[in-house]
Image (cartoon, grey):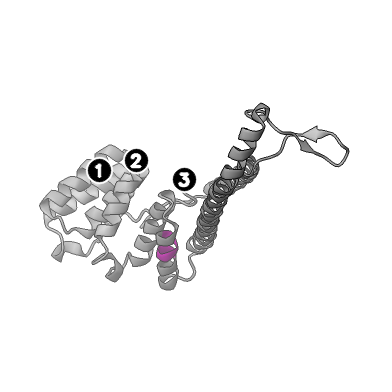
Amino acid sequence: MIYRILVYLIVFLASAGAVYAQPDRRDVRKGNRDFRKEEWKSAEIDYRKALVKDSSSLAANYNLANTLYKMGDVEQAAKVYDSLKDSAPESEIAADWHYNRGNAASVLKDWQAAVDAYRQALLLNPSDMDAKENYIYAREMLKDQQNRQDQDNRQNQDDQQNQDQDNRQNQDDSPQQDENDRQNPQNQDKPQPQQNDNGGSEPKITPQAAQQMLQAIQAKEKETQEKVKKEKAEILKSRQKEKNW
């Protein structure tokens, strides 16, 4: 799930005669035409043909990554974006490369990478409102992710402490219980009700049962939070827009 469309810079580079061989330029331009017609598979083939002739082609690699993203292969698109880390930051598409890299990271829920990428895009282009809104959103998601991790760590620690306490309690009670069983055989395997304030009896809630109840409540709260986040993401997604260059 993404919150704004990629910056689809279809790289023509009219002055790139010194950079790309003529066959490579033809393949890239053909890929651009297929891309504009949303013929993603054909565009992918064109860009890959260009890369066979020049594997270092910035235009072919960048446009291939955009095409893979549109095809839904976001993980592979992210790898292609990352492969340009030595050339893209020094090029004229640097800001948009960072932005698109942030979008791919957001889909993969790598919120730290998304925050870093959007930040770099804003440093290069402070007026990009899309990058600013995505940066704020990714930062909130990163904070929420970190809070959940902290909560899970605390919960695991509490569970371990409760388990250790139960083990110690069982060890402490075992000798006395054995003695009671020997003196009162009729008490064996007989549940003992707990007296309440009104003189009646009610079953005792064990620490394990209480913990399960707490976890059920927390799971319900998490489900509600995820629903709210999904609705927010859909609102952002409805405002997607393309940028062609």
Q: Which residue lies under the disc numbered 1?
A: 44
Is residue 64 on the magenta stretch?
Answer: no
Q: Which picture quadrant has residue 175? A: top right
Residue located at (23% from left, 50% from top): 29
Q: Which residue lies under the disc numbered 2?
A: 71
Nearest to the eye among marks 3 and 2: give it: 3
Query: Which percent across, then down, holds residue 34?
Result: 29, 42
How crowded is the residue under tag 1: few (<14 C-alpha within 10 Å), some, or many (20+)? many
Query: Could you tell me the amino acid type at mark 2?
Result: Met
Residue 89: tell me if it is visible: yes
Nearest to the eye among marks 2 and 1: give it: 2
> SS at mark 2?
helix
Does 125 sit above or below residue 166? below
Between discs 3 and 2, the one toward the N terminus: 3
Between residue 150 and residue 200, name the one nearer to us: 200
Query: Which percent across, then down, holds residue 72?
Result: 36, 41
Locate residue 16 relative to residue 70 in the image: left or right.
left
Give the Cα separation between the discs numbered 1 and 3.
Answer: 22 Å
- Which quadrant is the C terminus positioned in? bottom left
CB under 8 Å between callouts 2 and 1? yes
Residue 236: tell me if it is visible: no
- Which residue range is magenta in the image? 114-118
Between discs 1 and 3, the one toward the N terminus: 3
Query: Could you tell me the amino acid type at mark 1?
Result: Glu
Question: What secondary structure characterizes most of the magenta part?
Answer: helix
Number of disc labels: 3
